[in-house]
Image (cartoon, rainbow, N blue to C red):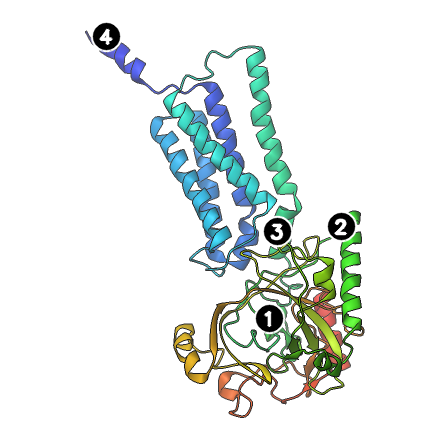
Amino acid sequence: MAHGTRQRRRGDAFELSTVGRVLLAVLSGTAGAIHLAMVPAHWASSPAEGFGFSIVGWVQIAIAVLMLAMPSRPLLRAVMLVNVGAVGAWAVSRTSGLPLGEHAGHPHAAQFVDLVCVGLELTLVCLAALWLSRPSLGRDWHGARLVVFAIVPTAVLALGTAALASPSARNHVDDSHAAHAAIVAADGTTSAAAGAHVHSATDLSVTAVNDRGFSLLSNGHHHAITWHDLDAVTQAELDRQLDLTRQAAARFPTLADAAAAGYRPAGPYGPGAGIHYIGGSGGTVTADGSLTDSALLNPGTLLYDGTGPDAKLAGLMYSVNTAVEPVGFVGTNDVWHDHTGLCIVISDKGITTALSDEQNPTVKEQQCPLVGGRFIKQTGWMMHVWTAPGYDNPGGVFAEENPLIACSDGTYFTASAAERTAQHPDNSCKSGAAGRPSAKTLATITKLVAQ
C-alpha cells in the first residue's frame, strides 16, 4: 500500500522537460539582463524607473535560475504573472506614460531594445502556459531534434546581445553618463515660463565656475541631450536636412522679416532661446513625426536674439503633434521637448503666458479662464535647431538653449514670479532686455559644454 502511494506521488510530481527548462530559463535570463543593463540610464533620469528596472531584472534572473534548478507549476504561473505585468507597464509607458517617477504622465517612444525585451516576455508567457499544460513536451526529443532545438535558445541569446549593442541601448547609457554635456535650456517664453521640468540637468550648477546662471535654465520636459556618432549614410542625410533648415533661416534674417511674413510674438524674450515668433505653416510631417523637406523649409517658429525690428535670427523651432516623441530628424541626436500646465492669452499682439510658473497646476487650470487665458495640459513636441548664421551652438545644433543668447547685463538670470512686475509679468531677464554674453562668460560655458 505504501509502495503504491509513493508511486502515485511520484507520478503526480511536476517534471518539466529539459528542453522546457532551458528555453524558459534563456528567455527569462535574457529579458532580465536587458532590464539590468538599462538600470544606470533610467536611474540617472528617474530613480523610480531605475529601481523598477532593477527589481524586474533581478526577478527575471532569479526565475531563470529556479527554472533550471527546481521548476514547478507555481513557478510557471509566477513567470506568466511577472511578465504580463512587465509588458503591461511597458505598454502604459509608451501610451499614456507611467504614473510615477520624474517622467510621470509622459509617454516614451518605443525603441529596438525595449521591443526585443517585450517580445521575449510575450514569448515567455506563451511558452510557460504551453509547458504548464504539457510539462513533458520535448522529453523524448533526441538527435536531430535536439540539434534543431539548440538553434532557438542560441538565437534568443544572439537577439538579446544585438539589442544591448544597438544604438537604442547605447544611447540610453550615453545619456546617463552625459550630464555635463546635457545642457537643459530655458526659452523663458510662451511655453517655457510655465510648468517646466526636465528629465536630467547639467552638472554646471555644481561646479566652482561662475556661469552667470546658464546652468539654472530649464525648458520643458525632455530627456538628456548628448551627441551620438552616426553612420556615414545617416550622417549624410542629416547634413542634407540641416542644409534645408539653413535655407529656411535665410528667408527671415531679421525680426522685421518675420513680422512682414505674418509671424507674431509668442511670449517675451528669454535667455537661452531669445524670443519666439510663431506663424509659419510648419510644412507636412508623417504619421510617425518624421520631418519632410516641406516641414524643414517651413518652420512654425523662429527664434530671435532681441525684440527690435533689426534683431537677428538665432534659431528655428519645429513642432510635431504625435502621441509619443516623434522621429523628427534622421539619427538619434534630436531630443524633443514638451510643456505641461500652461495658461496662455492670445491677442492681436501675439501670445503671452498668464499666471506664474510657480502656480499650482490645479489652481492655474481653475484660474486661467478668469484672466482670459486658455489652459493647456500638455503641448505638442518641439525642437530647437541652431543653424542660423552666427549662432552655432557649442552645445550642439539640437541643444535646447544657446549661450550666445543672454540678457543685456550678460547674465542668464531668470526672474521668479515674485521678482516680476505687473508691467512685465513674463519678463525672465532681470535686466529686462536682450543682450550678448561677455567673451569670458561664453568661453567658460563653451569649455564646460565641450568637456
**Relative to 451, does residue 407 appear above or below in the rendering?**
below
* Residue 259 vs residue 111, the one in the foreground: 259
Front of the two marks 1 and 3: 3
Q: Residues within 10 Å of mark 2 (few under 14, many from 20)?
A: some
* Residue 356 vs residue 163, the one in the foreground: 356
Q: Residues within 10 Å of mark 4 (few under 14, many from 20)?
A: few
- Kindly check if marks 2 and 1 are in contact, taking CB atoms under 8 A apart as contact: no
Which residue in the protein does label 1 denote? Answer: 206
Q: Amino acid at mark 4?
A: Gly
**Relative to 449, does residue 368 appear above or below in the rendering?**
below
Spot occupied by residue 408 in the image (x, y as percentages of width and height): 69, 87
**Quadrant of the frame with the C terminus:** bottom right
Residue 189 is at least partly visible in this image = yes
The residue under the point 47% across, 28% down is: 24
Between disc 2 and disc 1, whose residue precedes?
1
Between disc 2 and disc 3, whose residue precedes?
3
Spot occupied by residue 149 in the image (x, y as percentages of width and height): 56, 19
Which residue in the protein does label 3 denote? Answer: 173
Q: Amino acid at mark 3?
A: Val
Spot occupied by residue 388 in the image (x, y as percentages of width and height): 77, 71
Which residue in the protein does label 2 denote? Answer: 234
- Kindly check if marks 1 and 3 are in contact, taking CB atoms under 8 A apart as contact: no
Identify the secondary structure beneath mark 4. Answer: helix
Q: Which mark is residue 4?
A: 4
Rounded to the nearest angstrom, the CA distance separating label 1 from label 3 is 22 Å
Between disc 4 and disc 3, whose residue precedes?
4
Rounded to the nearest angstrom, the CA distance separating label 4 from label 1 is 75 Å
